[in-house]
Amino acid sequence: MKQSRRRFIKNASVAALATGTAGFPFITYGKPISQKSKLGIALVGLGYYSTDLLAPGLQETENCYLAGIVTGTPEKEKIWAEKYSIPKENIYNYQNFDSIAENKDIDVIYVVLPNSMHREYVIRAAKAGKHIICEKPMAMNATECHDMIKACKDAGVSLSIGYRLRYEPYTQQIEKFAREKTYGNIQIVNAATGFYMKRPTEHWKVKAAYGGGAMMDMGVYALQAARYSTGKEPFSVSAQQFNPDPENISEVDETITFQLEFPGGIVANCMTTFSSNVNILKINAQKGTYGLEPFQGYKGQHGFLPRGEKFDFPEKHQQGVQMDEMCKAIMDGRPSLTPGEEGLRDMVIVDAIKKSVKLGGIKIQL
C-alpha cells in the first residue's frame, strides 16, 4: 500500500504539471533545500486548527517539525513553549513578525488565520524569504490569490494551499476512479458538507469582514470534491443562498446550493451549510454509484462501491501527511499537489458562485 501510494502521488504530480487548466499553469517558485533533513515550520495563528490538529500532526512527521509560533496572545506563548520545547527566539507576535526573516530555524510559515488575513501574511512571509502553506480557502477572492502568487514568485518561495484531503488515500482513490474510468463515464456528482453552527455565536466564521460564511468554509470541500471526483474543470455555475436563521447568521451565507457543469455532460449538485451536519460525496457513473461517507472528516472516512461493496484504508494523521509531503516537495524543488494555482482555481469559482447568488441564481460562465 505504501509503495503504490507513493507512486500514485508522483504520477498525480506529473499529470497536474502536464495538464493544468488553461490560464492556470502550475509554477515552481522555490529552490530545493537539500541541505536539511527536516524543515522547520512556524504556525501563524494558534486557534483550534493549530492547537488540536497541526501541532499534534507535526509530532508524527518525518520531513518537518514545529520550529516556531506566531501569536497575538501572550498567555499562549508559555503554554506552547513548554509543551513543544520552542525556544524563546522562535516565538513571534504580529508586530515583530517580519523579523522572522532572520531566523534560520524556520523554513516554512503556515498561515492559519481568518480568511481576511491570508493575503497580508502570505505576502509578508514571502518577503521574509520563507516558503508558505496557507489554509483554505486561499483568500477573499481571486484578485487576492493573484497578488499572493505573484509575491511568492517574485520572492522565489513556494506556496501550497492546505487541502489536506488531496493527500489522503480515500480522496486519491476517488481521483483514480475518475482517471481510469473504473465505472465508466461519470454522469452526476452530489457533494454536501456542513455542520450546525451553535447560535448565537461571535465566531469569525459568521462575520463578513473576516471572510466568513458556509461557502468560504465547508463549501470549499464540496467544490474541491466536484473537481477531483471528475478530474475536470467546470465551465459554468449557478447558485442559491438561504439564511433560515437571520437573527443569528445574517452577515454571511448560512446555506448555499450550487450547480456545476463539466465537459462531457457531467453535472455536480453541491451544498454547504452551517445549519445541519452533512458529509457525503456520491458519484453516479455508467456502471454504478460510488463515493465516500463521510468524505471530509479528519478521520473515520468510509468508501462505498456499487453493489454495496466497501473500501477502507489504514488511518493516518491527515495534517501530518499533508505537511510531510508538502515539505518533501519543497526540499525537492517541485510543486506540491496543491500549489497556489489550485487555490486560485477554487476562488475563481467561488467568486462566480457569489455573483450568481447576487444576480438571483443565474448561470455564470467560467
Image: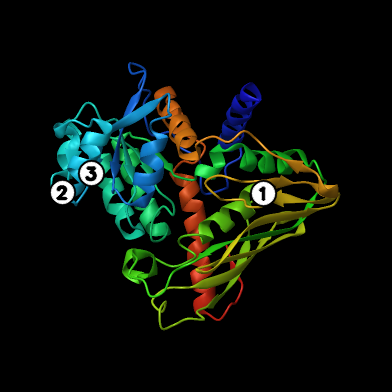
Earlier sequence position, callout 3 versus callout 1: 3
Determine whether, in the image, residue 266 is placed left or right of residue 46: right
Residue in the image at 54% along x and 74% along y: 356
Q: Amino acid at mark 3?
A: Val
Earlier sequence position, callout 1 versus callout 2: 2
User: Residue 345: x percent and y percent?
Assistant: 51, 52
| In contact (CB < 8 Å): disc 3 and disc 1 | no
Of the 4 image quadrants, the one containing the N terminus is top right
Of the 4 image quadrants, the one containing the C terminus is bottom right
Question: In which quadrant of the rendered view does residue 68 lie?
Answer: top left
Residue in the image at 34% along x and 66% along y: 203
User: Residue 328: x percent and y percent?
Assistant: 44, 26
Determine whether, in the image, residue 133 is placed left or right of residue 364: left
From the image, tell me which residue sits under label 2: 74
From the image, tell me which residue sits under label 1: 229
Residue in the image at 67% along x and 42% along y: 175
The residue tagged with tag 2: helix, strand or loop? helix
User: Residue 316: x percent and y percent?
Assistant: 54, 34
For the residues labelled 1 and 2, the Cα–Cα distance comes to 43 Å
Q: Amino acid at mark 2?
A: Pro
**Residue 345 visible in the snapshot:** yes
Nearer the camera: disc 3 or disc 2: 2
- Please tell me the numbered disc located at residue 260: none
Question: In which quadrant of the rendered view does residue 52 lie?
Answer: top left
| In contact (CB < 8 Å): disc 1 and disc 2 | no
Nearer the camera: disc 3 or disc 1: 3
* Colour logic: rainbow
Q: Eyeballing the image, is 156 above or below 270? A: above
From the image, tell me which residue sits under label 3: 70
